[in-house]
Every structure is written in structure tokens, then in C-alpha cells.
């Protein structure tokens, strides 16, 4: 049997950290994928090739966010069955999830290949880069099935308490991705296609390794792959809101970028660096939240609601302590930190002004992430989606427009982030207190 971690027993703090750290490592490797593509395209192929890859960034990003959400639904259903120690339900949940990943991937690949050109025309892709952008998107969709299969397989492993194996697979494939990126660009005539095929190769390999692991350890049997109707409905009920949330929040960020652009090149550069530095907060807090989601799923399945509440308190303590400590360090070394990215004093000054607004209050985000993931782990996904969308899309937009009417000040623009983290966290706490997540 595959390696598992039973989160319904043993010391809570230790188990949460043991589970969260590999999740953080996986996030770092995922960032490596993106960074490597950007570095190779910009340094080896030039601005037009970089623009061709970037032309589809909203489409590819939205799809990745959507199916990450759907895999969350599968993970929660599996974790709850694991917590109940219901082997029949667990087996059906795992095989349904894998079948959905395969079917969904094939359907999307076909649709993507058919409508790639229509999408690129809809976003007004310049004629000079259209063919390269089209080639890149076509190849991207050919790899989508493998991406979905890996996401589902990794979700199965994590729901069973195994976060180390997906990390190791991503690490191996990340190294291969770097090597093939270089080799393909060197020996293929079309540089954009070289980058695309390198990504597909790493996706094929990650899917193959993860499925092989599940097959070898008896978690999945090919003859049992089937779509169970009620379980599919439950996976979609939990996963669809999380997926839609990721898509809509990603698109809403375009509106914020519009206001950032209005402050000029200095502001754009400062925020570009800021969003990179912010990952030092965001990624560990997301890893803690994801760990708490699986922890909640297993313990709700086992009806250990008191243990869920203890785990929530532990996660909040970890998250808040980490956020405050990191904020103190980054504020103290603010100029040096921005100096890593830029040498212009004006950009550094603006970057420091931004972090003095957001970083002292970043602990607000801990409450947003932790309560939302706890609720999802308990099977409550629609409520957190509505709350997050209201705060990070509608309310954020309203106060942003209002602030810009008061004064054209970059600090007011930055302030919309902690304000909406705080309001979302407060509303999610209220929803958590209702206790509807204890119905599983």
C-alpha cells in the first residue's frame, strides 16, 4: 500500500508541519517551472517570442486555476472517505477522480485545439506574433490531459496524507524541464515551440510517474477506473466553486493592474518586484492552508470535530507568527530587498512605501486562507467562494475606485489588499462559526 499519513491521530502541530513543508516545496518547484520559461524565452528568443508566449497567459492561467480547484474537490472527498476508514468509498472516490481527470483532459484538449485561434483573435493578439502564439497554445493543449492526470494523482496522494511523493515527482520533472528547455531551444528551429514541447514533456513524465506510483502501490487499478455518479456530483459540488474562484480572482487582478499602470512605469516596476517578494508570504501560507484542508477532510470524515478546531488554532498560530516575523525582517531590509531587482532609487522608494502598507497587515491573509481551506475540507465550498469573490473582486474594486477619487496615492492603492483580506477573513470566520461544515 502507498505511503499515507493518518492526520486523525498523533500530535497536531508536528503532523501539520510534516504535511505542509512538502506542499511548500511543490509550490517552489512550480514557480521554478514558470521562472525558467520566462528566463529562457526572454534571454534566448527575445521580446517577440516572449510576447507570443504571454499572449495566452490569461487562458492558460485560468485553466490551470480552474482544474486546481476541481482537484481540490476530489481531494476533499477522498480525505473524508480515508478519515471514515471506509475502504469501499475510498476506492470509488480515487478511481472516479482519476477517471474524471482523464476524461476532462481529453475533452479540453480537443476543445482547445479547435478554438485556440478564436481565443487569440478575441484578445486581439498582434499579427506579428499570432502564428507563434497559436503554435504555443496548440502544443499547450496537447499536454493538458497529462497536466490534469498529474493534478488528480497528486490530489489522491495528498488526500491520503502523502505530500512528499508529488514533491519528488515535480522536482525530478522540473530538473528535466530545465535541461530540455535549453536543448530544445538550441536544436529546434522554432524557439516558441521548443519551450512548449519542453513543458509538455515534463507534464507527460509527471503524469506517468504519478500514475505508476499509484499502480505499483495498489491505490489505483486500471480495470476499476469508472465514473461514479453521486461521487462525481460531490466532487463537482466542492471543486467547481474553488475552480471558479481561482479563475475570477485571476481575471479581477487585471482591473487592479489597470490602476497600477495609471501610476506610470516606476509603479509598474515597483509592483512587479513587490509581487515576487510577496511570494515569501503567500506560498508558505497557502501550503499551511492546503495542509489544513486535508487535515480537516480526514478528521471530518472521522467525526473528530474538536481535533479540527485544535488544528485550526495551531495553523493560525503558525501562520500569524510566520507573517509577523517575516514582515519585521523584510521591512527592516526593505531597500536592500528591492535593490535585488532594481537599482533605480525611485523604484526602490515606491516599493518600500508599498510594503509598509501591506506587510505589517499580511497576517490578515492567514485568516482568509485558513478559514477558507478549513471550510473546503469540511465540504463547504460555495460559501467561501462567494465570500472571497465578493471581497477580492467586488468590494476591492469599489474601494479602489473610491480611494483613487480621494487621492492619486500609491499607498492607497496598496491598502486595498490588507483591507479586503481582513474583511474576507472576518466573513469566513462568521461562516465557520455557523458550523455547517460539520455535516459530512
Image (spheres, rainbow, N blue to C red):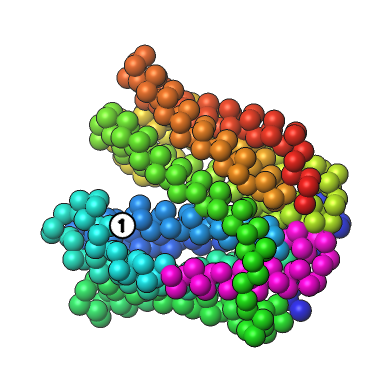
Front residue of this view, candidates 47 and 109: 109
Residue 305: image location, x then y, percent: 83, 46
Q: Can residue 436 be seen?
A: yes
Residue 324: image location, x then y, percent: 62, 34
- Outermost residue, top direction? 406
- Residue appearing at x 32%, y 19% in the figure: 408
The residue that mark 1 highlights is 56
Residue 348: image location, x then y, percent: 36, 33
Q: Which residues are magenta?
A: 79-107
- Outermost residue, front direction? 229
- Residue appearing at x 53%, y 80% in the figure: 208
Q: Can residue 72 be seen?
A: no
- Residue appearing at x 46%, y 77% in the figure: 204
Left/right of residue 370 with respect to residue 110 in the rendered view = right
Quadrant of the image for the N terminus? bottom right
How many numbered marks have been drawn onto this rendered protein structure?
1
Q: Label 1, secondary structure: give it.
A: loop
- Residue appearing at x 48%, y 55% in the figure: 66
Amino acid at each position: 500500500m502507498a505511503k499515507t499519513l493518518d492526520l486523525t491521530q498523533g500530535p497536531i502541530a508536528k503532523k501539520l508541519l510534516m504535511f505542509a513543508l512538502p506542499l511548500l516545496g511543490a509550490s517552489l518547484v512550480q514557480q521554478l517551472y514558470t521562472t525558467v520559461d520566462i528566463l529562457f524565452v526572454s534571454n534566448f528568443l527575445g521580446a517577440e517570442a516572449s510576447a507570443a508566449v504571454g499572449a495566452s497567459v490569461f487562458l492558460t492561467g485560468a485553466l490551470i486555476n480552474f482544474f486546481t480547484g476541481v482537484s481540490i474537490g476530489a481531494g476533499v472527498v477522498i480525505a473524508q472517505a480515508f478519515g471514515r476508514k471506509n475502504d469501499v468509498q475510498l476506492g470509488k472516490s480515487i478511481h472516479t477522480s482519476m477517471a474524471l481527470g482523464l476524461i476532462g483532459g481529453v475533452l479540453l484538449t480537443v476543445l482547445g485545439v479547435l478554438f485556440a485561434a478564436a481565443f487569440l483573435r478575441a484578445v486581439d493578439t498582434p499579427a506579428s506574433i499570432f502564428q507563434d502564439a497559436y503554435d504555443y497554445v496548440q502544443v499547450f493543449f496537447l499536454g493538458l490531459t497529462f497536466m490534469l492526470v498529474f493534478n488528480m494523482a497528486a490530489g489522491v496522494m495528498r488526500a491520503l496524507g502523502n505530500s512528499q511523493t508529488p514533491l519528488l515527482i515535480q522536482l525530478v520533472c522540473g530538473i528535466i524541464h530545465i535541461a530540455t528547455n535549453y536543448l530544445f531551444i538550441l536544436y529546434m528551429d522554432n524557439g516558441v515551440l521548443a519551450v512548449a514541447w519542453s513543458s509538455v514533456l515534463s507534464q507527460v513524465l509527471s503524469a506517468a510517474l504519478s500514475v505508476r506510483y499509484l499502480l505499483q502501490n495498489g491505490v489505483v487499478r486500471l480495470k476499476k477506473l469508472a465514473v461514479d455518479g453521486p461521487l462525481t456530483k460531490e466532487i463537482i459540488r466542492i471543486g467547481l466553486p474553488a475552480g471558479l474562484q481561482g479563475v475570477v480572482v485571476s481575471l479581477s487582478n487585471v482591473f487592479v493592474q489597470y490602476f497600477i499602470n495609471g501610476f506610470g512605469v516606476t509603479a509598474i516596476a515597483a509592483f512587479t518586484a513587490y509581487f515576487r517578494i510577496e511570494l515569501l508570504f503567500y506560498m508558505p501560507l497557502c501550503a499551511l492552508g492546503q495542509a489544513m484542508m486535508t487535515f480537516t477532510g480526514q478528521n471530518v470524515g472521522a467525526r473528530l470535530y474538536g481535533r479540527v478546531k485544535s488544528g485550526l488554532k495551531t495553523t493560525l498560530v503558525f501562520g500569524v507568527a510566520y507573517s509577523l516575523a517575516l514582515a519585521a525582517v523584510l521591512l527592516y531590509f526593505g531597500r536592500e530587498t528591492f535593490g535585488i531587482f532594481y537599482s533605480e532609487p525611485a523604484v526602490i522608494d515606491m516599493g518600500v512605501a508599498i510594503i509598509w502598507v501591506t506587510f505589517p497587515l499580511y497576517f490578515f491573509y492567514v485568516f482568509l486562507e485558513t478559514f477558507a481551506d478549513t471550510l473546503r475540507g469540511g465540504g463547504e465550498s460555495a460559501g467561501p467562494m462567494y465570500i472571497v469573490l465578493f471581497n477580492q473582486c467586488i468590494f476591492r474594486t469599489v474601494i479602489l475606485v473610491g480611494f483613487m477619487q480621494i487621492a492619486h496615492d500609491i499607498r492607497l492603492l496598496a491598502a486595498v489588499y490588507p483591507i479586503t483580506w481582513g474583511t474576507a477573513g472576518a466573513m469566513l470566520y462568521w461562516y465557520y462559526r455557523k458550523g455547517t461544515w460539520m455535516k459530512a
